[in-house]
């Protein structure tokens, strides 16, 4: 749906349309997955051992949601702001994935969340690499 909607926009997309829609989908999925993981962590018996994980989940969810909203706006985008938002999202996803991975053996929801975060991080890095004038930056 996002790709069809972006095609109808009177402005040419700032990013490659396929990469942009892949990143938008990954950000949205990651935000949802992190929110669900935080909730699942709250239901675990030893929730106090998951405090850091919950915090990363919630922060990552908010950053991913914001990134998707910023990226979906095609009118007069600011390249520096887009770059900073994508870098922030990739960093949040990496940190959240690392934390969730440390609980993955005991909590399946953390394993699923780590995978979603790593996918979103990669989609953000792919989009950064495709930015005009930013090629090769990671």
Image (cartoon, rainbow, N blue to C red):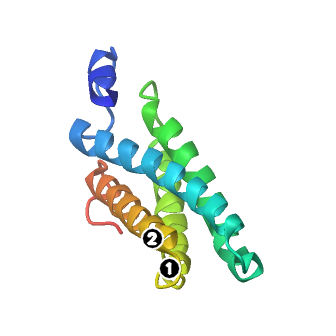
Separation (CA) of disc 1 from disc 2: 7 Å
Task: Read off the residue under disc 1.
Answer: 98
- SS at mark 1? helix
Residue at left offset 28%, top offset 29%: 3
Place of residue 131 in the rendered image (x, y in percent of width and height, measured from the top left): 31, 50
Place of residue 49 in the rendered image (x, y in percent of width and height, measured from the top left): 71, 83
Residue at left offset 52%, top offset 85%: 102
Rendered view: 113 above or below 28: below
Rendered view: 91 above or below 30: below
Residue at left offset 35%, top offset 62%: 119
Label located before the other in sequence (1 or 2) = 1
**Looking at this view, is 133 or 11 the one in front?**
11
Question: Is disc 1 in contact with disc 2, using a CB cutoff of under 8 Å?
Answer: yes
Place of residue 68 in the rendered image (x, y in percent of width and height, measured from the top left): 48, 41
The picture quadrant where one finds residue 124 is: bottom left
User: Is 109 on the left-hand or right-hand side of 7?
Assistant: right
**Looking at this view, is 61 or 102 the one in front?**
102
Check the image and name the residue furthest to the right: 48
- SS at mark 2? helix
Label ID, residue 5:
none
- The label nearer to you, 1 versus 2, is 2
Place of residue 78 in the rendered image (x, y in percent of width and height, measured from the top left): 48, 39
**Looking at this view, is 127 or 53 the one in front?**
53
The quarter of the rendered structure image containing the C terminus is: bottom left
Task: Read off the residue under disc 2.
Answer: 114
């Amino acid at each position: 749906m996002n790709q069809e909607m972006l095609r109808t926009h009177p402005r040419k997309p700032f990013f490659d349309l396929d990469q942009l829609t892949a990143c938008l989908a990954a950000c949205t999925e990651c935000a949802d997955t992190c929110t669900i993981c935080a909730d699942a962590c709250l239901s675990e018996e030893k929730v106090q051992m998951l405090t850091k994980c919950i915090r990363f989940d919630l922060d990552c969810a908010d950053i991913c949601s914001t990134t998707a909203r910023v990226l979906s706006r095609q009118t007069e985008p600011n390249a520096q702001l887009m770059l900073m938002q994508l870098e922030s999202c990739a960093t949040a996803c990496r940190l959240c994935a690392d934390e969730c991975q440390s609980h993955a053996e005991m909590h399946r929801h953390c394993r699923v969340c780590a995978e979603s975060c790593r996918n979103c991080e990669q989609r953000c890095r792919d989009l950064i690499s495709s930015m005009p004038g930013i090629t090769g930056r990671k």
